[in-house]
């Protein structure tokens, strides 16, 4: 994680994040001569009902490295096997509109993200309790404002 005392406030439950390989995977890729890719400004939904962080499978494939394994994912309607990737999340995205580039970001490394099909949803990532448990989340309902702190 990055510097202590970082606060990020957003309107609504959606935030833009950057997704990149975890530090360990990035070092492995560099050692193998594989170009490290970053997915910037990915729309994410803060999902307190999700126990794990999920990212659209197409986004994870575009990062260009193999999954670390397979897991069983339970949904309200089914149970499916899906790929698991190790990622680093940067919250909010370094290019998110409305956030000054010099503002400190929350950086969470070594997140086990599961691949899901989010289809036509307006977001491509669900930030689950595995990530949210590393922060303080304050929801101000009357102002539709969420503050994430670390």
Image (cartoon, grey):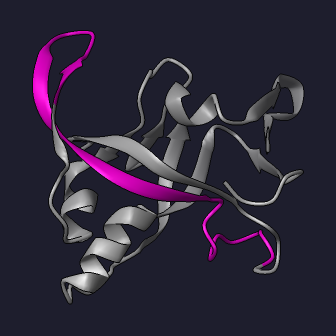
Tell me, yes or no, whether the highlighted magenta stretch contains residue 91.
Answer: yes
Tell me, yes or no, whether the highlighted magenta stretch contains residue 76.
Answer: yes
Query: Left or right: where does residue 11 sit relative to residue 66?
Result: right
Task: Give residue 146's position: percent from left, percent from top.
Answer: 78, 37
Task: Give residue 141's position: percent from left, percent from top.
Answer: 82, 24
Q: Indicate the quadrant where residue 113 lies.
A: top left
Residue at horizontal 82 percent and vertical 29 percent from the top: 138
Q: Nearer the viewer, residue 91 or 141?
A: 91
Task: Give residue 144's position: percent from left, percent from top.
Answer: 79, 34
Residue at horizontal 72 percent and vertical 36 percent from the top: 135
Residue interval drawn in magenta: 71-100
- In this picture, is 39 found above or below 79? below
Query: Left or right: where does residue 72 sit relative to residue 96?
Result: left
Q: Nearer the viewer, residue 55 or 27?
A: 27
Q: Which quadrant is the N terminus positioned in?
A: bottom right
Q: Indicate the quadrant where residue 94 lies.
A: bottom right
- In this picture, is 30 found above or below 65? below
Residue at horizontal 18 percent and vertical 83 percent from the top: 32
Q: Nearer the viewer, residue 13 or 132?
A: 132
Q: Is residue 20 among the parts visible in the rendering?
A: no
- In this picture, is 67 found above or below 36? above
Q: Which quadrant is the C terminus positioned in?
A: top right
Most extreme residue toward the left is 81
Task: Give residue 130's position: percent from left, percent from top.
Answer: 51, 30
Residue at horizontal 62 percent and vertical 77 percent from the top: 95
Q: Is residue 61 among the parts visible in the rendering?
A: yes
């Amino acid at each position: 994680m990055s510097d202590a005392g970082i606060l990020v406030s957003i309107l609504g439950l959606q935030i833009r994040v950057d997704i990149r390989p975890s530090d360990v995977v990035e070092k492995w890729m560099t050692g193998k001569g594989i170009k490290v890719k970053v997915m910037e400004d990915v729309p994410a939904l803060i999902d307190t009902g999700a126990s794990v962080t999920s990212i659209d499978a197409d986004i994870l494939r575009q990062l260009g490295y193999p999954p670390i394994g397979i897991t069983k994912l339970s949904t309200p309607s089914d149970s499916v096997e899906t790929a698991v990737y190790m990622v680093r999340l940067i919250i909010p995205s370094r290019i998110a509109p409305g956030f000054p580039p010099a503002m400190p970001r929350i950086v969470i490394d070594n997140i086990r993200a599961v691949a899901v099909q989010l289809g036509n949803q307006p977001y491509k990532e669900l930030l689950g309790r595995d990530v949210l448990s590393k922060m303080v989340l304050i929801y101000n309902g009357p102002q539709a404002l969420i503050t994430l702190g670390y």
